[in-house]
Image (cartoon, rainbow, N blue to C red):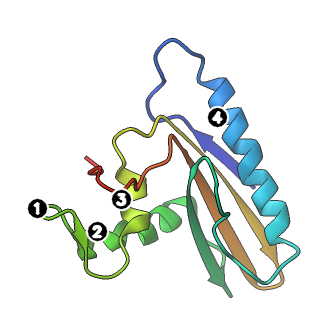
Amino acid sequence: MHYAHNPVPARGRSSAGPVDTIGRCARDWEQRANFTDSVMHRPAYPYGENLHTISGNAAWPWQVVQSGAANALTYDVRSDTCRGICGPYTQIVWRATRCLAGAVATDAGREVWVCEYDPRGNLVGDRPY
């Protein structure tokens, strides 16, 4: 299953190009996830990336987003710091994100969801909003 969404069209360019590009990256990752037990972020990658793995059940897109958004509880807005893991949350709400695409890979009893964000977020020294 593949899904794509462009939250805010970039000025001066069609939204189809960037969504198609990061959509291809998400599908490439999905195919890789089908052949390995390892679920890791790609190194030196030009897009932001959120990964979600679930075993035993199928997930809906809103559940995957909700899982990352739940990390908001560990993010302190005033100090722009985390008490634990908050990267998935800050990537979801990153103000500069213009395009988002994702895919889900399934195998026996497991789903691996990948969401790609352009431009990438979670840049050191920048606040998400």
**Front residue (pair 28, 82):** 82
| Rendered image quadrant of residue 79 | bottom left
Element under disc 4: helix
Tell me the CA gap for discs 3 and 4.
Answer: 20 Å
**Residue, disc 2:** 72
| Residue 105 image point, x, y percent | 77, 66
**Residue, disc 4:** 19
User: What's the amino acid at mark 3?
Assistant: Thr
Left or right: residue 85 compared with residue 32: left
| Rendered image quadrant of residue 61 | bottom right
**Residue, disc 3:** 90
Farthest residue to the top: give it: 12
Marks 2/4 in contact by CB < 8 Å: the verdict is no
Marks 2/3 in contact by CB < 8 Å: the verdict is no
Q: Which residue is painted at 47% across and 62% down in the image?
A: 65
Earlier residue among tags 2 and 3: 2
Tell me the CA gap for discs 2 and 3.
Answer: 8 Å
**Residue, disc 1:** 78
Q: Residues within 10 Å of mark 3 (few under 14, many from 20)?
A: many
**Front residue (pair 87, 101):** 87
Foreground: disc 2 or disc 3: 3
Q: Residues within 10 Å of mark 4 (few under 14, many from 20)?
A: many
Q: Which residue is painted at 75% across and 55% down in the image?
A: 1
Earlier residue among tags 1 and 3: 1
Left or right: residue 30 compared with residue 50: right
User: What's the amino acid at mark 1?
Assistant: Arg
Q: Which residue is painted at 30% across and 51% down in the image?
A: 128
Q: Which residue is painted at 59% across and 56% down in the image?
A: 115
Earlier residue among tags 2 and 1: 2
Earlier residue among tags 3 and 4: 4
